[in-house]
Amino acid sequence: MLTKGISVYHFYFFMMKKLIIILLLLPFLAYSQITGSCDFIPTPNMLDASKYSTTLRSDFSTDDPIVFNVYYHLINPSDGINPDGITEDHILASIAQLNINFNQYNIFYKYRGYRTIDDDVLYYDTDHSQYFDLLNLETDYADSINVMIIPTYVAAGGALFQEQYVKMPAWNFANILIGNTTITHEFGHLAGLMHPFRGTSASSETIFNDVCPPILDVTYSNEYLITPGTYTSASENVTRDANSSYFNAAVTGDMVIDTPAQFYHATYNFCKNLTTGEITYISHPDIIDNSGTDEPYIDVDIQNFMAYGYMGKIHFTNGQGVRMRETILDPTNTEFTPRMTVVSALYEPYKNYLGAGDIVISIEDLGNGFLLVCRNIVNLDYFQPGFDYDFYLDANSDPFDSFTAGYDVPIFNNTYQIGTKIYQLDDSSIVFTSGVCARGQICVEEAIGSGKVLTFTNYNNPNYTEQTLDSIQASDPNLIQQLENNKYHHIEKTSIKGNKVEETIYKTDN
């Protein structure tokens, strides 16, 4: 159970709220699927080729944006300490990655927050298939796609299409900041994509050696090349000539016509050019399709997000983009609509903090062991990362700040209004969100932690004695009475947060 402590605040402020809403118009080295396999079962609709087009296109900019809510559940041991050090930074990085990889198809994801579940029973439960039912996600979080961050010792992630639910081991999240793309793979499943090697499995045929070829003077690494394996040829034929009698890309494999045919674990076999970073698939002349034409697998897409393998996953195909949108917009797939939200939600901060700022206005010794520290009021808006942003104070001025799509979280003190432009949505419109016009200050008590007294015989005499005070001495209400008479005393008291109050007195013998 998560427990939070709340300080007692003394509020001395006058606030005037102004609600101003102006709607002008509404990559990497990745370690995806290193161990185990992806837990995903295609639905009957996915396997019905008649429901999908085979038309390819590269421009999705005129399609209506589709926006989903996403909520996260982080499972920890009962002590609340995540062994993999997962924080909200990792979760926000995953939201950024999803938007960076899906936005070109006008598919977007709105971060709705996360919760921690500190429970040894759940954390050490070996039957992780029960997570969905145990946590009542379908009942309590039915308006969002739910991501369960489960213990690292669970080897593989997985996705449930009907429930729009993803489970991912914590190590995937721990590596998101250095390029792990497993969450993109699983969200591809949620949008209707299958593995490109669907329908294939291992056999007794050894297909290649654990060697990377030398090419001129360029060094290749076989660090990620698997040991000799045994695999079968795939049911999907290599040809992409739609007029060929051997063309079956629309009805076999992943049933997307612009993903090259491949077989199970083919994407583990590659070499990386250490000079250019280029990744080369290692084909073998004896590994052929089932067409009877001895067609070898030479164009396996080892960097597709839906493939298996160790190397960098960097793209979907346009055909996969079409398939995702057709799946989401298919009215017989009723899983999607309850989890969608409006486009304007992407312009809204995912979090707001209204409270004390960093500017200290005054400090008062309350005489009871506490300092009353008063600060300015701030209204901090936090915007989710992953977009190309411009931020404006008004519609007629240049932006005061800009961000490129990445993992940095834009945070601003919004005391009036902030205009936001998201280039992935509309590069010509600025949407203004409400701010808070706040006057006055917020004051909070801080315990005194230490202090000191400098004692002078003559205030202009640089010679003095110094007494260091601990928290009890500095908090003593009779401190002044205990000081020497007929001398000057410079008294400093410092709170446990480093704020300091000072005064100089002359103590008489009266």
Image (cartoon, grey):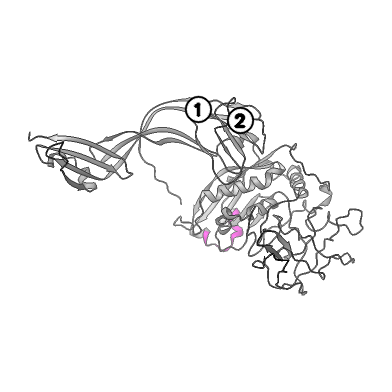
Is label 2 in a helix, a strand or a loop?
A: strand
In this rendering, would 65 be left or right of 129?
Answer: right
For label 2, the residue is 431
Quadrant (top left, top right, bottom left, bottom right) of the C terminus: top left
Q: Position of residue 11 (x, y in %)?
A: 36, 32
Query: Reading the chain from its start, which is encountered first: label 1 or label 2?
Result: 1
In the foreground, 276 or 241: 276
For label 1, the residue is 416
Any mark on residue 400, and which? none
Residue with the most extreme left position:
509
In this rendering, would 481 be left or right of 166?
Answer: left
Q: To which quarter of the image does residue 307 belong?
A: bottom right
Please give the name of the residue rendered at 11% of the width and 39% of the height, measured from the top-left corner: 457
In magenta, the rendered stretch is 123-132
Tally of numbered discs: 2
Taking 422 as reference, is 324 above or below it?
below
Q: Position of residue 185 (x, y in %)?
A: 67, 54
In the foreground, 224 or 456: 456
Residue 478 visible, this angle:
no
Taking 286 as reference, is 121 above or below it?
above
Please give the name of the residue rendered at 84% of the width and 60% of the height, measured from the top-left corner: 238
* 126 is within the stretch colored magenta: yes
Q: Position of residue 207 (x, y in %)?
A: 77, 72
Is label 1 in a helix, a strand or a loop?
A: loop
Residue with the most extreme front position:
217
* 434 is within the stretch colored magenta: no
* Amino acid at dot 2: Val
Rounded to the nearest whole Å, what is the CA distance between mark 1 and mark 2? Answer: 14 Å
Please give the name of the residue rendered at 71% of the width and 69% of the height, measured from the top-left corner: 212
